[in-house]
Image (cartoon, rainbow, N blue to C red):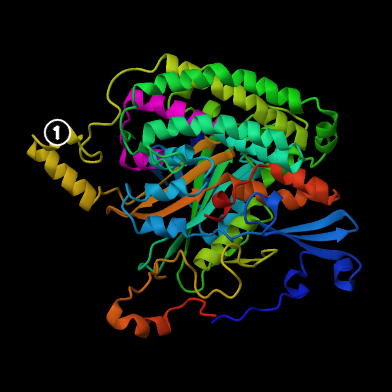
Amino acid sequence: MEKSLEPIIKDLHEKFGAAHEEFRGEAQCIVKAEHILAALTLLRDTHHFELLSSQTAVDYYPQTSPRFHVVYQLTSIEKNLSMQLRVPVNGDQPRLPTAANVYKTAVWRERELLDMFGIEFEGHPDPRRILMPEGTEGHPLRKDFPLGYEEPQFTFNYKEIDLRKPYAKE
Amino acid sequence: MTQIEEVTIDQYKHLVSERALTGETMLLNMGPQHPSTHGVLRLLLELDGEVVINCIPDIGFLHTGVEKNMEAKTYQKAEVMTDRLDYMNTMGNNLAYVMAVEKLVDLDVPPRAQSLRVILVELQRIASHLVWLGTSGLDLAAMSMFLYCFREREQILDIFELVSGQRMMTTYLRPGGVWRDVPVEFEKAVRDFIKIFPKRIDEYERLLTKNPLFIDRMVEIGHLSKETALAYGVTGPTLRASGVDWDLRKKRPYLGYEQYDFNVPVLTEGDTYARYLVRIQELRESLKIVEQALNKLPMGPVRSDNRKFVPPPRSEIGVSMEALIHHFKLWTEGFPAPDASIYSAVESPRGELGVLLAGDGGPKPRRVHMRTPSFDNLSVLPEIVKGHLVADLVAILSSIDIVLGDIDR
C-alpha cells in the first residue's frame, strides 16, 4: 500500500470507525452503510478523490448478513492514488443512501445495481432498470438467479418440449 | 408471453421538461436502429424545433450477461467472454482481464510476453481509433474517410490473424503470458505498417483537420467542462480533451510502459474538435510505442513457467508425467484463486477499463465486474447535448466514441 494513503485511512478510521484491509497492495476500507455518504463526501472534498471509477457489488450468497458488499472504487487524479470503500449490506431488502449527489457517475451505476442486484438506493433521482427491459422479474447477477439454458429437444420429445419452450411462436 | 406495453410519457415524466407534458415540445426516438448511434442505442430526445432540450439514453439492447456468464466458467475459459465486450478493443479487454487474474493469483509474466502485449495492445488502440475516425467522418458526410481508415485497420487485423488465427476475437493474451510465440513474419508485417502509417495519418489530417466544413461542424460543439467530466466519471481521450492529464499508461505504468518514450496529448477546449485532435495525436503516439517495443523486443519464453497456473507446452506433455498431470488438472478443473478481491485497470482506447475480480477460493470467480469506459462516457451525453441541434448530436455522440458492446456487457 502506498504511504500517502495511510493518513487518509487513519482519518476514515477515526471519523467513521472504518476497518481496513490490504490485499496485493490495495487498500480496502469497510464502512457502515450509515457513514457511506459522509465518507464519500470527505474523500472527495478533503482528500481530492475526484473520480468514482467504479461502483459495483459482490454477492456473497448463501451468506445473508451481510449478503452483499457494495464496492466504491475511488481515484484521486491530483495525488495519483486509488482506494476502495466497501459497504456490507444485508440480504433482506438491501438498501443504501444514494451517492448520486456526491458523484454523478453513481446515477447510472446505481441504476445498474438496482437492476442487477436489486439493491435500492434511497433518494435516487431516476430509479429505473437500466439494462434489462422494464417488467423483468428478478435480478440477474444475484447468485440465486439461474444462469438459464435451453432444454435439449430430441425426436421422441420434440413436440412435448416445444409446447413449453419460451420463444416467440407467432 | 409478455405483452407489449404501450409506452406513455408517465415513465419519463421526471426526466423531461414541463413543456413536453403539454405537447409544446416534441419527443422523438432516435434509434435503436439508426446509423449514427454506433450500435443499438436508443436516444429519447425532447425537441423544441430542431434544438435538443433533453436527451434520455436507453441502453441494454446488447446486454448479453457477460459478467454472469464469466462467473460460471473457470478463469481461463471466462477470458473468451471479454473479447465480446468492446469488440473494437479485443486485445485490450484480454489484457485488462488477464492482468486482473495475474494480480489475484500473483503470477509473473516474462519480459518478451510483456513487450508483445504492448505491441498488440497499441496496434489495437490504433485500429480502434481508426474505426472511430472512419465512422465519425461518415457521420459528418466525409464518406471517403471510412474507406481509408478501414483499409489501414484491415492491415492491423491481418497482423492479429497472423499471431492468433483470428481477426477480431483473438483471446491471444493469456494469464501468465501470451498463447504462443509470434511467427517469423510478424516483425516484417509490423514494420511495414510502421513505415506506411505516418503518411496515412498525414493524409487523414489533410482531408479533415483544416477542412472548413469539418471545423464548422466540430468547433465549440458539445463543450464538456473538466468538472462535469470528472463528476460523471469520464475517462480516456474524452477526459484528456477537457484538460485533465490522466492516462494510466503514464500515471500508473503497467507492462513496462515507463520505458517507452511517448507523449499524452492533452487539450483544454473540451469540444468535439478537441476530442478529434486528441485521438489523431494518439495515433502517432501509439505508433511510436509500437516501434520502440518492436526495436527492443527481448528473446525468451512467452509464458510463465509456473505450472500451477499456466499449462505446459505441448512438447513437454509427451515426455513428462508431471506436465501431463498439470495439463489435465488445468483444463478440467482450472486453478484455484484466493477468496479475496482485487481491482485492476488499464487504459483502453476509450478510457479506464477496470476489472473487479473476486475469487471464492475455487477455480471460478465469485464476481467479475468490468468497469467499461463507454458506460460512464455515455452517461455524460445528456449534459453536453442540451441546446444543440439534432445534427450536432450526431457529431457529439461520435466524438465520445462509444461501443455498445462495452456499455451493455
As drawn, B16 above or below A15: below
Q: Nearer the viewer, residue B225 or B35?
A: B35
| Viewport quadrant of the N terminus of chain B | bottom right
> What is the secondary structure assignment of the residue under circle 1?
helix
Left or right, A146 with respect to B146, comes to left
Q: Residue B366 sits in which quadrant?
A: bottom left
A8 and B328: which one is in front?
B328
Q: Is residue B259 visible?
A: no
Position of residue B217 in the picture relative to residue B304 (left or right): right
Q: Look at 59% across and 59% down and name the residue there.
A: A110
Q: Position of residue A117 (x, y in %)?
A: 50, 65
B110 inside magenta stretch: yes
Q: Nearer the viewer, residue A16 or B81?
A: B81
Would you say A81 lies left or right of B308 here? right
- Kindly identify the residue that appears in the image at 61 percent across and 41 percent down: A49
Q: Residues within 10 Å of mark 1 (few under 14, many from 20)?
A: few
Which residue shows up at 61% across the image and 19% down it?
A: B198
- Residue type pointed to by label 1: Glu
Q: Which residue is mark 1?
A: B316
Residue B106 can be seen in this image: yes
Residue B289 locus on image (x, y percent): 51, 21
Magenta stretch in the rendered image: B99-126
